[in-house]
Image (spheres, helix red, strand yellow):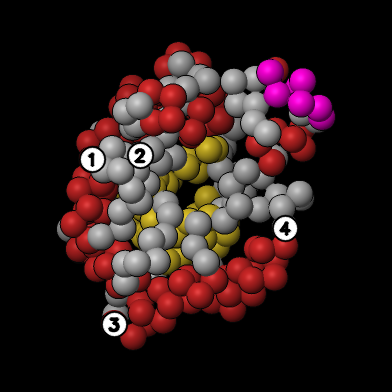
Amino acid sequence: MQKRQLGNSDLLVAPIAFGGNVFGWTADEKTSFDILSKFTESDFNFIDTADVYSRWASGVGGESETIIGKWMKQKGNRNKIIIATKGGMDMGQGKTDVTKKYLIKAAEDSLRRLQTDYIDLYQTHKDDETVPVEEALEAYAQLIKEGKVRYVGASNFAPERFTAALEASKKNGLPRYETLQPLYNLCEREVFEKELEPLCVKNNIAVLNYFALAVGFLTGKYRTKDDLSKSIRGIE
């Protein structure tokens, strides 16, 4: 299977990533282990998760990372897996937090749950426009220097803020976001295609879109309001 390079990094991943927000929520530990094993046995190597998965169900968070960490330890395959995780969402602090102090702690908590010494791709899960873009980048500079993170990415950024972050990286010699994880699918295309895609093409930023199947709508699962009861994930 031909691998894809993420931005200007040396991370080479299969063209399909597995999103781990179901682990510890709609997929218990045994089911999660089975899915992860089948996924990697098929020559896929890229797993994306976040510290906040699945706090909305448990009230705690970290369940997905914990399961992935246990699975990698059981399989002894950490060096074959590209792990992406995210930090900055509300994990009990009551708000999105992308300050340097918080992101360093969040990354270290993720390392512990994942039972690994390093994270291949650490992503700012959601921007906070009241915080200078340099704050997160300075945190990542420290984490990279310490060998705890290899590369960094961003998710849920406005075009202006993403541009500002790229400029700050270049101006100040700080780590650059090599990936962007936006909302993008066949139903929701306009914002990415008009505002973010040109930035990514110009700067060679890899795109790891989320809700690729529009939360199940594109599978045909949901066609009426009555269909929403078919799954715990049903939304309006």
Whether the magenta-drawn stretch holds residue 33 is answered as no
Label 4 packing within 10 angstroms: few (<14), some (14-19), many (20+): few
- Above or below for 173 versus 188: below
Which callout, 3 or 2, points at the residue further toward the start of the chain?
2
Query: Which residue type does callout 2 highlight?
Result: Asp
Which callout, 4 or 1, points at the residue further toward the start of the chain?
1
Q: What stretch is highlighted in magenta?
A: 223-229
Which residue is under mark 4?
A: 189
Horizontal side, residue 141 vs residue 56: left or right: left
Please, what secondary structure does the residue beneath circle 4 have? loop
Disc 4 and disc 2 in contact, CB within 8 angstroms: no
Which callout, 4 or 3, points at the residue further toward the start of the chain?
3
Query: Which residue type does callout 1 highlight?
Result: Asp
Which callout, 4 or 2, points at the residue further toward the start of the chain?
2
Whether the magenta-drawn stretch holds residue 225 is answered as yes
Disc 2 and disc 1 in contact, CB within 8 angstroms: yes
Which callout, 3 or 1, points at the residue further toward the start of the chain?
1
Single out the mark in the foreground, 4 or 1.
4
Query: Which residue type does callout 3 highlight?
Result: Asn
Disc 4/disc 2 C-alpha distance (Å)? 27 Å
Disc 3/disc 1 C-alpha distance (Å)? 27 Å
Please, what secondary structure does the residue beneath circle 1 have? helix
Disc 4 and disc 3 in contact, CB within 8 angstroms: no
Q: Going 46% across and 72% down the picture, which residue do you hit? A: 161
Which residue is under mark 1?
A: 109
Which x, y percent locates residue 57? 44, 24
Which x, y percent locates residue 42? 59, 32
Please, what secondary structure does the residue beneath circle 3 have? helix
Which residue is under mark 2?
A: 51
Q: Tag on residue 172?
A: 3
